[in-house]
Amino acid sequence: MKTPIYGLMAEFENPTALAAAARHAREKGYRKVEAYSPFAIEEVNEALGLHHNRLSLIVLCGGILGGLTGYLMQYYLAVIDFPINVGGRPLHSWPSFIIITFELTILFSALATVLGLLGLCGLPMPYHPVFNVPRFALASRDRFFLCIEARDPLFDRHDTAEFLSSLHPREVSEVAH
Amino acid sequence: MSDDQRDTRSVQSGRPTVIAPGHTFGSVTDKISSIVLTRRTPLFWFVPFLVASALLMVFLAAVAYLFVRGVGIWGIRVPVMWGWAITNFVWWIGIGHAGTLISAILLLLRQSWRNSINRFAEAMTLFAVACAGMFPLLHLGRPWLFYWLFPYPNSMNIQPQFRSPLVWDVFAVSTYATVSAMFWFVGLIPDLATLRDRARNRIAKVIYGILAMGWRGAASHWQKYETASLLLAGLATPLVLSVHTVVSFDFTVAIVPGWHSTIFPPYFVAGAIYSGFAMVMVLAIPLRAMYGLEDLITMRHLDNMAKVMLATGEIVAYSYFFEAFIAWYSGKPLEMFAIWNRMTGPYAPTYWLLIFCNLVFPQLLWWKKIRTNIVWLFVMSLDVLLGMWLERYVIVVVSLHRDFLPSSWGIYSPTIWDVATYVGTLGLFFFLFFLFIRSMPMISIFEVRTLLPQAEVTEGVEK
């Protein structure tokens, strides 16, 4: 009985090979598949069925919250908390409140984008098993990796390794936990 | 020059390519990361860095003296209470605009040539905003009470006046600084991961590792990352246009002749981009030569930036013309006098020098020979930076020094402390910038990879 592993990882030399491998893995029925590349590749996202994410919705919520915060803060402070008569102008002089409302809408949306991105990606992440593969350091340089995880129902240490080898990778390695 | 052009010209189109041919994913990664990680820190880094550090000391001395003696050490006197401080504020914040334009607007417009200049242009934005922020803060008189500008529950029971453009400015500039910093940092994450994986030095590995936050280039992350980049670009675009608009409100909301004009917001934004591209050029031209980056920042980049400068310069020229025309057409004696005073008053030489620097001289950019000549472009960029500074000087000082009643007129001249503070912020800017190019990849590595022909998926991938 060998120790359990995180998954099996195949290394490819170019984005075309990675996209083809990702497509084959999906066609074979694997679902816990992740591709690693030094830049975003649209075809790989297609092959892995990555179409939507919830980031836009998070940013929309952030923007609405920011806009409401900006306007209501000014309304509360200028009309209720600290009413001050400037040349008889109305306390609720909404046109002059628009700018700060706009700025806070942008600020909250941008914060929501960054925090949402980190949250959805699970970053910061101090440890991840894929870094146990020595050659994985090249994933941030010029190599392309496809990893089939052990928690996939179809995963079999021997069969999956054979399947990955059939995709003509540079090499296939086991990813230790 | 001719070498450059021959190298960067693609065979088919005859146009210079974005990236010189012959690069691979590995070679661009090594080339850009080696500047930070392995190459010896060159002499041409130390010399400007030491000069910038010396100027930073001048800044600290000027600020220390300002804290002790108050803003009276500057030349500001009634009626010109804004003087160099606000001139420099508007100039610096304008310079920042080009960085956001390159990183956000050109991303939305799918101008892929921006990929090799956006990183240091964004850094330039951050540092320019830092320099800009100094002036309104120091100009407050009691800078340590700056936080009174923000609404917060306080025992004095007072709140900021939200009908005042000066409070709008606080929100606009602080939002701009925050969003620019986040945009820059998010753009850095994949490159920080590259540096983490390539660093040999243990300390460097740990620091870049912490900053990269465990980025591993997973497809599911890249997909969200691309969405985030587009969203941030979409947010930064209206933001950058709003910032200089709000800065122009500092002037237009006042009824001073020469300020109270609806042309100011677009005119300020165009001028900001004009001077910002000039600063990008001033930084890019020596950097590419010193670090041998001519294959990544090619003549095509410089040519394109020169075209943006030319276009925004024409918008600025149009604004100058209409500012004068409307003053005449309005039939208002005060408005007419304000423009006439600019052209013929005691500050007339600054006005005509500004017209020469911003309008006349840059017309040479219509010629491709000039746009592809490094020396000309460098001189042109310095000229535009000077011209845009003079523009703000003319707007601030000349409008204020003769407003309504001759009894309240006065003449303004800066003191040595004005000069020291301004030159000091130049020191702060270049100090931060040289630290940045030493410690961070000054060109976005992962975005340059996507410009290579190998990045294309060549065989059809159907679902």
Image (tube, rainbow, N blue to C red):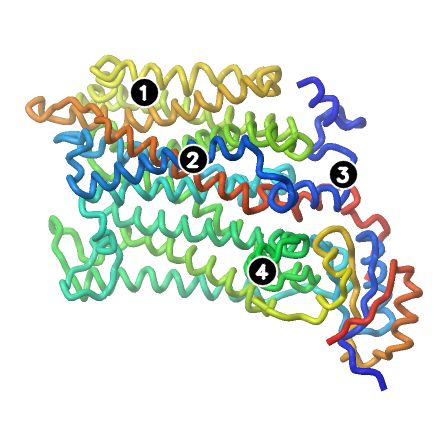
Which is nearer the eye, B399 or B34?
Answer: B34
Q: CA distance from mark 3 to mark 4?
A: 29 Å
The residue type indicated by label 2 comes to Ile
Q: Which SS class for mark 3?
A: loop
Q: Are marks 2 and 1 on the same chain?
A: yes
| Chain that bears disc 2 | B
Give the number of the disc on residue B23. Answer: 3
Disc 3 to disc 4: CB gap under 8 Å: no
Q: CA distance from mark 1 to mark 4?
A: 61 Å
Is A22 on the left-hand or right-hand side of B375? right
The residue at which mark 4 appears reads as B206
Q: Earlier in the sequence, mark 2 or mark 4?
A: 2
Q: Earlier in the sequence, mark 1 or mark 4?
A: 4
Q: Earlier in the sequence, mark 3 or mark 4?
A: 3
| Chain that bears disc 4 | B
Give the number of the disc on residue B398. Answer: none
Q: Quadrant of residue B129?
A: top left
The residue type indicated by label 3 comes to His
The residue at which mark 1 appears reads as B325
- Identify which residue is drawn at 38% across, 53% down: A103
